[in-house]
Structures are given as C-alpha cells and as structure tokens.
Amino acid sequence: MNLNDFEKTDYNGLYVSKVAHVTYGRKYVARFQYDKKRYVKVLGYSKKDNITKRDAITLMNNYKDSIIVAQVEEPKIEVLNENKTTLPAKEYEKVVSQNKEMKDLLGDYKSLDKNVMRDGIRKIYELEELKHYQIELIKLQDYLEKENKRMIILFEGRDASGKGGAIRRITRYMNNKHYRIVALGKPDDTQRNQWFFQRYIQHFPTGGEMVLFDRSWYNRAMVEPIFGFCTQEEHEIFMEDVVNFEQDLVRQGMILIKLYFSVSKDEQKRRFDRRIEDPLRQWKFSEVDMQAQDLWGEFSEKKYEMLRRTNSRSAPWHIVRSDDKFLSRIEAMKIILNSVDYDGKNYALNFEANDKINISVQRELMQMRKSANY
C-alpha cells in the first residue's frame, strides 16, 4: 500500500484514500502493527460497499481482535452460568468491565421498552455522524455571509415525509442571525388578490442569508388544486410561469435548491398511525393528514406533473427518498453542501450521493409509472 495515496483519519490505524474512485468511491484501509508484524487490510469502499467511517472502525476493530485472539493463548476461566461456558481470563475481565460500564450508562434499563432503548442508542450514533455534516453547514453559512450570497432551499413532499425533521437537523447548530425558516399559512384576502409569488418574495433572503421554506410556492402545484384552493386556470398559469420565475432568480445570483422528500405510502401510513397513538405527536395530526392516504392517487398525479414540468437545468429538483429519516437527512445535507464551493471543505467526508436515497427526477418518474407507491 502506498501511503502517499491515503490520509489518516482521526482514528488510529484507519486510513482513507485521498481521491475517490469514480465507481467505487473512497477506499478505507486498516494498517497496524502487532507483535513486531505489520498488518494491512482493505475494509471496503464508501460507494461500492456503502461503508461509512463508523462502519470502517467497527470492521477494523474486528480485524484487529481476530489477529490478537488468534496469536495469544490466554488462561481460561470458568464462568458458571446456565450454559457453563469457558472464557479466556482477559476476555472475562473485559466482559465484566463492559457490563459495569453499560449498567452505569443505562441505569434501570430493564424497566424500559427494548425497542425504545434500541432506537435511542441508534439515534446517538446517528447524531454523531450528522455532526460532521453540520460542521460543514456552518462553514457554508460563513461563506454565504462573507461573500454576501443569498440562498433559498425549498422543502417539498407529502405530509409526514420528513421535511420538518430535516430542517431542524440542518439548522440545529447554525447561526440563527443568518438563516430563517418560513412556513406560510393560508393566504388572507389581500394576498389572494396579489400576484401569486408576491407573498413569498417578501420573505426572500438578503445578502449573506439563507431562507428555508417548509413548503413553498409549489403548494399551487399539488395541495391547492387537489383541495380546491385554486382554480384549474390558476394552477395552469403557475405551471407555465414558475420555471421562468426560478430562472430569473438564479440569473440574478440566487442560489436555489429544491428538495422533494419522497415517502412511500406504507411508511406515510405508519407515521400517521404513530401520530395518532403517541400523545407527544398527536398535535401533528390534522384533518388534511386524514385525507392524505385516501387522496394518494390524486397527489401522485400532481406530483408527477410537477416534477416533469418544473424540473429545469437552472433549478433542478433533488429527489430524496425519505422512508429512512436518518439517511434522507444526510443526503439532504450533502445536496446543500455540494451546491456551493465554500472555503475549508473537509474532503475527508463522503459527499458522494447515495444513489438509493438521492435519486434523479427521471428515475423517480420512471418508478412512478411502474408503481403508485411513491
């Protein structure tokens, strides 16, 4: 292995290739010395094997343990339990120590629901992985401020598709002086008689600012025509005008990112059921939500038309499959970070799209023609 082609990670013994292979992505390698011998093992590729640094660390530790256990003969200690197993003395001491540490951390864990505890532990690991990308978002925000750039991010998708959760994770550590979240309600009588885009324009960012729209002017492409909040003529005028409107924004220097969170019908139902059953989430469930499953087909038709007619070179849609909330949030962050060449970018992070989550408009439309599940 030529170490000039690799860089150290912040974990001892773990290396990652400086340059990503076009097809396979970045290569993770374990390299360590034990008992005067050097061991090297290729652990996998970020894209081909869908491996993250956390996965690579686990694989490396397993590999090291297999080398050490194979070469060291330890005295055995008999553990008297119902299975009457025998362990090496050091392994037994390690198990006892780990058991004590876990009990100190988890407390009275036996009184908790195992599924709840499992989900909680998983979230801890996920939050740690998200932090690497959240650091990059702060760098991006600093760049926008320094260069006086303006950014708009649209979050679209069906009800319970994960838009709000993604926005919260994206903005969690950002400077709240330089970003705003906009979630507009129903227009009043004055706004109904204005140019349709006018009530959105008044919330647009100034120099150095980012605005995140939790639903946007694309309400007129899907929600409004389905529930009769606009006429067919108003809907058609919007569909004809919106591409030119967005092209003008981009031409005048606006950074415009359009994210569509694509949830499956089964997963949407599961999330609705959870909202109904969980007292902490019942406030999220609305009358509109009650109709979402029944109107799935109508929403699919409008979604298909919207993606087909409003996807443009200057303002493309980015489809994020959101059944897995954690992976969808990671991919949304990658899309945002890849939109700007900001200063101090950490190229040791994996910015390559996960093609199972971050998919093209063409692929989404093709899938929708085959199945009504999205």
Image (cartoon, rainbow, N blue to C red):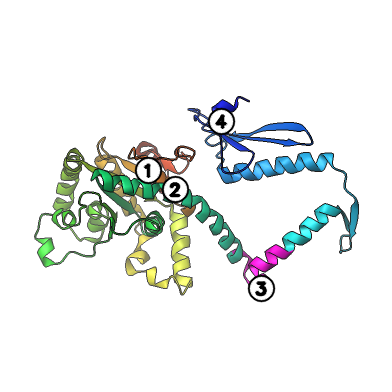
Instruction: Give the labeled residue for mark 1.
Output: 337
Front: mark 3 or 4: 4
Residue at the (21%, 49%) spot, across then down: 207
> Would you place residue 10 above or below residue 120 in this image?
above
The mark that comes first in sequence, 1 or 2, is 2
Who is closer to the viewer here, 317 or 228? 317
Residue at the (36%, 60%) spot, across then down: 292
Instruction: Give the labeled residue for mark 2.
Output: 133
Q: Provide the major secondary structure of the magenta segment.
A: helix
Tell me the SS state at disc 2. Answer: helix
Q: Residues within 10 Å of mark 3 (few under 14, many from 20)?
A: few
Q: Quadrant of the N terminus?
A: top right
Q: Determine contact: label 3, label 1, CB under 8 Å.
A: no
> Would you place residue 24 above or below residue 91 in this image?
above
Instruction: Give the labeled residue for mark 4.
Output: 6
Instruction: Give the labeled residue for mark 3.
Output: 108
> Would you place residue 304 above or below residue 5 in this image?
below
Identify the magenta region.
100-115
Who is closer to the viewer here, 199 or 52? 52
Q: Residues within 10 Å of mark 1 (few under 14, many from 20)?
A: many
Q: Determine contact: label 1, label 2, CB under 8 Å.
A: yes
Question: Is residue 54 at all visible to an observer of this figure?
Answer: yes
Tell me the SS state at disc 3. Answer: loop
Identify residue type, mark 1: Leu
The spot of residue 182 in percent (x, y) is 26, 59
Distance (Cα) linking label 1 and label 2: 8 Å
Q: Quadrant of residue 58?
A: top right
Distance (Cα) linking label 1 and label 4: 23 Å
Identify residue type, mark 2: Tyr
The mark that comes first in sequence, 1 or 4, is 4
The mark that comes first in sequence, 2 or 3, is 3
